[in-house]
Amino acid sequence: MKTTISVIKADIGGFPGHVSVHKECMEIADKELGAAKNNGLINDYRIMRCGDDLELIMSHTKGINNEEIHKLAWDTFIKATEKAKSLKLYGAGQDLLSDSFSGNVKGMGPGVAEIEFEERKSDPLIIFMADKTAPGAWNLPLYKIFADPFNTAGLVIDPKMHDGFVFEVHDVIDNKRIELKCPEESYDLLSLIGATDRYCVKSVKKKNGEICSVSSTQRLNFMAGRYIGKDDPVCIVRAQSGFPAVGEVLEPFAFPFMVKGWMRGSHHGPFMPVPFEKANPSRFDGPPRVIAAGFQVSNGMLIGPSDLFDDPSFDKARAETNLIADYIRRHGPFEPHRLPMDEMEYTTLPGVLEKLKSRFEVIE
């Protein structure tokens, strides 16, 4: 029987502002998923958070897009939101775009990444969770993990990986998908995924079809038609034995590359890899954060998590993040710190520009 890992997240209210999740909200989530485990709906679970996002990690045998699993997540978010509202937490329930469940949380606000697989003799799995950024943040690391031999030595020296991988890329604006093979189509792949606001890597597979990685690609702003927060994506990556090693999966994050998001979802900023307890973006609501939870999956149970960025070898990346943050912040409201105008359409800026519209005059 195949094992399914579902990671479903939502911003149900920040404490304070956009920094963290209140412990009472996490306790409610723990109670709800604990009951689901006791009644056999799920095999195992973990409640986590990255910044102000509540993360539900569930192991079960019901496959992806299962209505019961998604309803469990939805009901959990609703109850946590009720507590958040009673505590007057900021933006309580902003990721929940509907008042009622319709069979699947996709398109309703929460971010979703689900992966189904036959367990191997040993199955290491890493779950990345981010705050203050968008789904395109996974494009660069997923490319480096599965297609860059300077990052992943196994692409060259491991015969189980030497044939390369297949990337499924989503056009999140036109709602289309394409599959591209690497290494033979790597230039085509890069031509798309370098545009992180439009093209997002949804999944990576081996060429025999075995799933390697899945990420959330929901664009909350496009679904809502207005700015209500960044999407704060999640990503699941399997490791070892024909997949990149754990160290190869983590290696891209030693470089604090620039991502979109940060304050009001309107700025570029460096992506900071941090331990669980440091995922509290407070400087200018940032910089954007990423945590890495390592698990061994054993007969449907989650062994872990191991806090994979709780390692001094990432101290330099964190120090560089702060240097980059100092530099980019000095630009204030100017590009390239602020996003280009065509990417500000779904932020709060249009409300400011509307009042100036009638004052523009034609230049003769």
Image (cartoon, grey):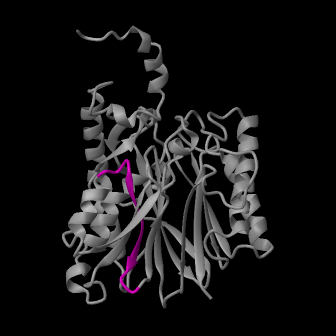
Where is residue 24? Give x, y as percent: 71, 46
Name the residue nearer the viewer: 313 or 244.
Answer: 244
Q: Residue furthest front?
A: 364
Q: Quadrant of residue 170?
A: bottom left
Quadrant of the drawing holding the N terminus: bottom right
Which residue: 67% across, 52% down?
Answer: 26
Name the residue nearer the viewer: 10 or 209.
Answer: 209
> What residue span does the magenta drawing correspond to?
195-208
Quadrant of the drawing holding the C terminus: top left
Q: Quadrant of residue 266?
A: top left
Where is residue 80? Give x, y as percent: 72, 48
Residue 116 among those drawn in magenta: no
Residue 203 among those drawn in magenta: yes
Q: In this view, does 56 lie to the left or right of 259?
A: right
Q: Is residue 296 left or right of residue 340?
A: right
Where is residue 41? Give x, y as percent: 75, 73
Q: Examine the rendering and report whether any part of residue 278 can be seen.
A: yes
Where is residue 280? Give x, y as percent: 49, 43
Vertical placement of residue 348 versus 141, above or below: above
Vertical placement of residue 190 versus 298, above or below: above
Which residue: 64% across, 51% down?
Answer: 108
Q: Examine the rendering and report whether any part of residue 274 can be seen.
A: no
Q: Residue furthest right?
A: 39
Q: In which quarter of the image is residue 116?
A: bottom right
Q: In this view, does 166 lie to the left or right of 68?
A: left
